[in-house]
Image: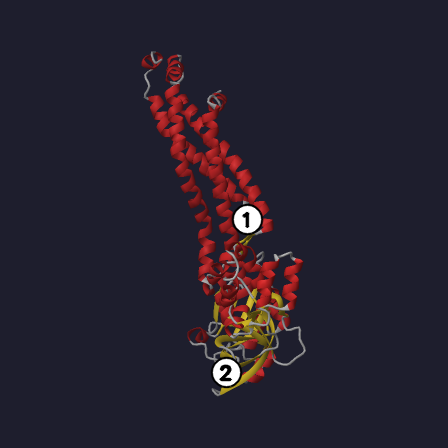
Amino acid sequence: MITSISWKNVWRNKHRSLIVIVAVTLGTVAGVFVAGLMKGWSDQRVHAAIYTEAAHIKIQNPEYLNNEEISFTIQNYEKVKQFVESQSTIENFTSRTKVVAMAATSRGNTAVTLKGINLAEEKQVSDIHKFIVADGGSFFDVDHSNPIVISDKTAEQLRIKTFRVTTALIDSLKSLQVPNNVISIAQEYEGRRFYSKTKFSKAFESELTKSEARKYGSLITELAKYYHLRSKIVFTFTDMHGEMTYQSYRVCGIYKTSNTVFDAQNAFVRHSDLTKAAGFGPNDFHEIAALVNLEESTEKAEQLAISKEFPNSNVMTWRELIPDAAMIADIMDVYYFIIMGIIFLALAFGIVNTMLMAIMERIKELGMLMAIGMSKKKVFWMIMLETIFLTLSGSVIGMALGALILKITGYTGLDFSSVGEGFEAVGFAAVVYPNIEWGFFFGIIVLVILVGVLSSIAPARKALKLKPIEALRTE
C-alpha cells in the first residue's frame, strides 16, 4: 500500500515532478556519455599499449634497462626462447634486436631506435603493420634491399613527408565540387613544395576567407600530403664491436599510431638486415615480446614463471613498461562513479527542494494520516519511496538514452582530429569509440537509490516533526 501511495504521490503535481525527472534524465545522459567516452579512450590506450607498443610480457637483459648498449642482449637466449615456446599459455611471441641510431637525410636528421624484426612473428604479436597510412607504401612488401618502415612523425622530421599541390589534387577538388575561387588559389601553389604542415596550412589558408579555411583548409592539407617513398636514410650507430657504423635504408612504408612519442622513437627493419650491419650473432636479441592467453593465465603468472626459471633475465608486464596506461585502466572504474556522484550531488539539492515543497503542500494531509493511525515509520517510508521513484524514473530514462547514444557513437566514432595532435602527444587516439560495460548501469541504479535515500532525509524529518492536531488546522 505504501509503495502504491508513494508512486501516485509522485504524479500529484505532474509539472513539478516532470521538471525534476527531466533534470535527472539529462544529468544521467551526460554522465553516461562522459563515462563511455572516457572508457573508450581508456580501452584504446590499453589496447595500443599491449598490441602496438609493449605486448603482455617483455623479457630483456637487466642491464639493457639501465643502459641501452647494443651489447646487452638476452642471456641464455636459446633456453629462454625454448621455455617461452613450451608455455601453453603463451599465445605468440617474437624476438627483436634494437639499435639506437642517428638517422639523416639531405634535409633533416633525428634519433630513432631501429627494431630488427621477423616479419611473420611480428604480425602475430604486434599490429603495427595495420597502421600504414594511405599512400604510405607497405609493411615490407617490397623487393629492394634494406627496406625500412618509419613513422609519419619521423618522415616529417627527415623531410620525407612534404606538402604540395599537384594536378591530381586539383582534379580531386573539382570532383568534390570545391568552389572555383578556392581551386584558383590552390592552382597558384602548384609546383611549390612545403616541408611542414604548419607552413603549408598557414600559407594557403591566409589567402582564403575564414569560412573557406574552416571548410576546406584541412581537406586540402590532407590531399596535399606526399610521402617520398624509397628515400634513402643513412643511420649512424655503434656495432657489437664498439665501432662506429654507417648503414643506409630505403623507405618502403610509413606508419602512424595514436601515440606520437612512440612513433617518433621507433623505426622497423628486417632482422637479417640489421644483423649484418650491427654484427649480431645468431642468438643476439635484446627482447622477447609475448602475448598471453588471458583465458588460461595472467600476465603476472607468466611473469613469475619466467622470472623463476631465469632469474638473470628481466621480465616485465605491460603495466610496468607503460605505467600511465595501467594507471588509467585501474582508476577508470572509480572515475566513472566520481563523475556520476558529482552530477547526482548537484541534482540532489533540486530533489530535496522539490520534496520539501511537496511536504509543505500536504501538511494537513500528513496530519490526517498520522491522526488516523499511520506510524511515523510508514510516513518516513512513504516520503523516501516518493524521492526514490522520482529520482529512479529520470535515471532509468537517462540510462536508456545514454546507452543509445553510446551505441551510435560507438559504431560511428567521435572524431577529434581538429585537436588530434594534442591527444596523440599523450598517447590517446584522435578518433574515439565510446563504450561502457553493463555493470556500470547497475552501479548507477545503486547510486540513484542512495541519492534518493539521502535526499529524502530532510523532507522526511520535516514531516515527522509535524503534530497531527496542529497540522489538521493548517489551511
Which amino acid, mark 1? Answer: Asn
Q: Nearer the viewer, residue 148 or 84?
A: 148
Residue 240, compared with residue 339, is above or below; it is: below
Question: Which amino acid lies under the numbered mark 2 shown in the image of this protein?
Answer: Thr
Label 2, residues with CA under 10 Å away: few <14, some 14-19, many ≥20: some
Q: Is residue 296 left or right of residue 175?
A: left
What mark, if any, has residue 111 been given in the picture? Answer: none
**Helix, strand, or loop for circle 2?**
strand
Mark number, residue 435: 1
Q: Position of residue 90 (x, y in %)?
A: 58, 64
One can see residue 54 in this view: no
Q: Where residue 470 sits in the image (x, y, percent)?
A: 31, 14
The residue singled out by tag 2 in the image is 236
Q: Residues within 10 Å of mark 1 (few under 14, many from 20)?
A: many
Q: Is residue 20 above or below residue 273?
A: above
Between label 2 and label 1, give the one nearer the viewer: 2
Q: Are marks 2 and 1 in contact (CB under 8 Å)?
A: no
